[in-house]
Amino acid sequence: MKAKLEALKNLAARARAKQAAAAAALSVAAVQAQAALPAEATAAITALKDDGTDMVAAGWPVLVAITGGLILMGIFKKVLSRAT
């Protein structure tokens, strides 16, 4: 029974060692993949991010106008219902 328990412990230790080695290999691969990013791809991603930021900035006035209009319509509706 003790031999089986020791064998299971050794098996678990080897599995943990394999997991650690796999994690290390993946992290090295990720670093290499990031280092190999071409300048054109970096420029395209930066341009896309800038365009997205500009679109969000352009959308805020529209959002404020719609929200303000809905609030004013609600207030107008309350005033009319109390006036009649």
Image: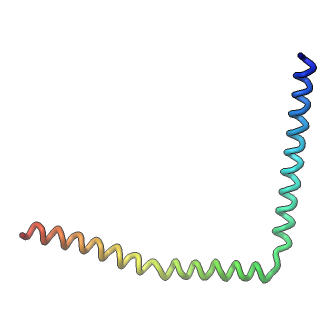
In which quarter of the view is residue 15 placed? Answer: top right
| Quadrant (top left/top right/bottom left/bottom right) for the C terminus | bottom left
Q: For the view shown, which residue lies furthest in the left direction?
A: 84
Where 46 sits versus 81, above or below?
A: below
* Residue 62 position in % (x across, y down): 41, 80
Residue that appears at 49% across and 82% down:
58
Work out whether residue 17 or residue 31 is closer to the camera in this orientation and state it.
17
* Residue 3 position in % (x across, y down): 93, 20
* Residue 67 position in % (x across, y down): 35, 73
Where 21 sits versus 82, above or below?
A: above
Residue 65 placement, left or right of 41: left
Where 43 sits versus 79, above or below?
A: below
Residue that appears at 87% across and 50% down:
22
Residue 16 placement, left or right of 41: right
In which quarter of the view is residue 38 placed? Answer: bottom right
| Quadrant (top left/top right/bottom left/bottom right) for the N terminus | top right
Where 25 sits versus 70, above or below?
A: above
Residue that appears at 65% across and 80% down:
48
Work out whether residue 8 or residue 29 is closer to the camera in this orientation and state it.
8
Residue that appears at 87% across and 59% down:
28
* Residue 23 position in % (x across, y down): 84, 51
Q: For the view shown, which residue lies furthest in the top direction?
A: 1
Residue 63 placement, left or right of 9: left
